[in-house]
Each structure stands twice: as structure tokens, then as C-alpha cells.
Image: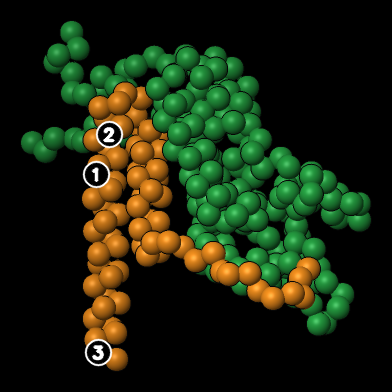
Chain colours: A green, B orange
Amino acid sequence: MSEDRPPEMEEAALEINLRQPGVAALYAWLLPGAGHFYQGRITKGILFAVCILGTYGIGFVLGDQKVVYAAWEPEKDHKRWQFVCQMAVGLPTFPAMIQGIRYHQDKEVLWNGFMAPPQPTHDLNTRDALSDWNLRLNSAFEMGTLYTVIAGLLNILAIYDAFSGPMFEAAPQRRE
Amino acid sequence: MNNGPLEAPLALPFNELWYLVPLFVAICLVFGATRHERWGPILFHSVQNARWIALFVLVVFGILFAVSWVL
């Protein structure tokens, strides 16, 4: 039966059990690949987990654990818009969210400043933490940021896939 | 905060272009996986995407190279 169908149509005819798509999407956000594991789509779950967490992990290490933080201070011209993309990776960015909330509430940051926003300086003779990171890490800071941002954007695709299944392409029409 | 001497910068050990290769692979695989359910078509689509991205990068490189040559 399946031999006389083109491969695209054969794949489109696959019935994929998405279970509860909303729950799968939530799992996919919390941990890349987890939504697919929940749906029993193990190989795709492994692919998403390895590619997305791997990309995020490489970026995090390249950036010396400084590149993922939540800060939004327009009055100081410091808007970490990259975190909007990074937070799509889910759980691995939760420490940064907690630190960001504490920072904005003027509370002491936790865990020895792990994933905390850069601390400002009030002394003109000292460098603030962000300048220090940029000076010390140089292009590694930019590269780490790029990796972690792309990991977040890729996980948005994975969340969509967990929610509604793959976007099969229509088989090309043959010209008569 | 720091007012002490600068620590040695952590420069990237390889040329920055090499760091785009893992990104390139991850993007092609994830994009392919969102279009298909089976490994065969996923890999096929990923290779096709990789070819298109490589072509695009080469064209941009060619344009920039030509511009820098003229200037």
C-alpha cells in the first residue's frame, strides 16, 4: 500500500498522537525535548534536547556564565532584550529570572551572584560589572550571547512542533 | 565592580567563524525536525537547508569581498 505513495504523502499520512498539546508545549518550554518525550516521540525529543540544550550550554560556557541575565533598566540605557529570546529555553534560565526579580526589588542577589544582572557602580573611578565582563570576555561574551539567544529561538520552533506536530510540506505538483 | 588591574581577556581560542559551524548544524537539524517526523526526511531537509544557508553565506561573502576590493 505505502509503496505507491510518494514519501511526502506517506509522511503526511502519519498519525501522530500529540496527547494533550498544551501540556506538551508547556513541557517543551520547561525543558527542550521534554514535550516530545511526553508524546512518545523519543527520537525527535533527543534531537531537540541535544541541539537546543547543547547550543545553550556551549553559549553559557563560552560566556563564562555571564551571558544569561535579566535586566531592564531603560533609565540607565541598559535593556537586556536578549533575555526575552533566552528565556524560551525554560528551566535553565529560571535562576536568571529569580535573580532579575530580586535585583529589581532591591534585594540581595543569591548564589554568589550566579546569573544575576551586572551590579552597577556609583564610583566614577571603578568599572561597572558589565564593562568588566565585556573587557574580560571580549568576543566570547558576544558569541555566548548569540548561542544562547539562538537556542531560545530554536526552542520556540520545538514548542510549536510539540503543540501542533510537524509542518509537513505539500508534495510538489507535477506539471502535465 | 572592579577597580583593580584587568584580568587577562578570555579570547576565543579559534577564529570566530568556526563557532558558527555548530550553530549552523543545530539550526539545520532543528528546522528539518519541525518539518518532518522521520529521520530520513529530517536529515534530507537538513542537508538541503545547509546547502541554502552555505550558498547565502557565500553570496554575502562574495558581495562584501567585491566591495572591499573596489574600496
Mark 2 lies on residue: B43
Q: Three-letter amino acid code at disc 1?
A: Gln
Q: Three-letter amino acid code at disc 2?
A: Leu
Mark 2 in CB contact with mark 1 (< 8 angstroms) = no
Labels 1 and 3 positioned on one and the same chain:
yes
User: In the depicted view, which residue is nearer to us: A117 or B51?
Assistant: A117
Question: Which quarter of the rendering shows the N terminus of chain A?
Answer: top left
Q: Which residue is painted at 65% across and 56% down in the image?
A: A66
Mark 3 in CB contact with mark 2 (< 8 angstroms) = no
Question: Which quarter of the rendering shows the C terminus of chain A?
Answer: top left
Circle 2 Cα neighbour tier, 10 Å, few/some/many (<14 / 14–19 / ≥20)? some
Q: Which residue sits furthest top?
A: A1
Residue A162 in sight in this render? no
Q: Quadrant of residue A166?
A: top left
Mark 1 lies on residue: B48
Quick one: SS at disc 1? helix
From what the image shows, is residue A99 above or below residue B69? above
Circle 1 Cα neighbour tier, 10 Å, few/some/many (<14 / 14–19 / ≥20)? some
Q: Which residue is painted at 57% across and 49% down in the image?
A: A60
Mark 3 lies on residue: B70
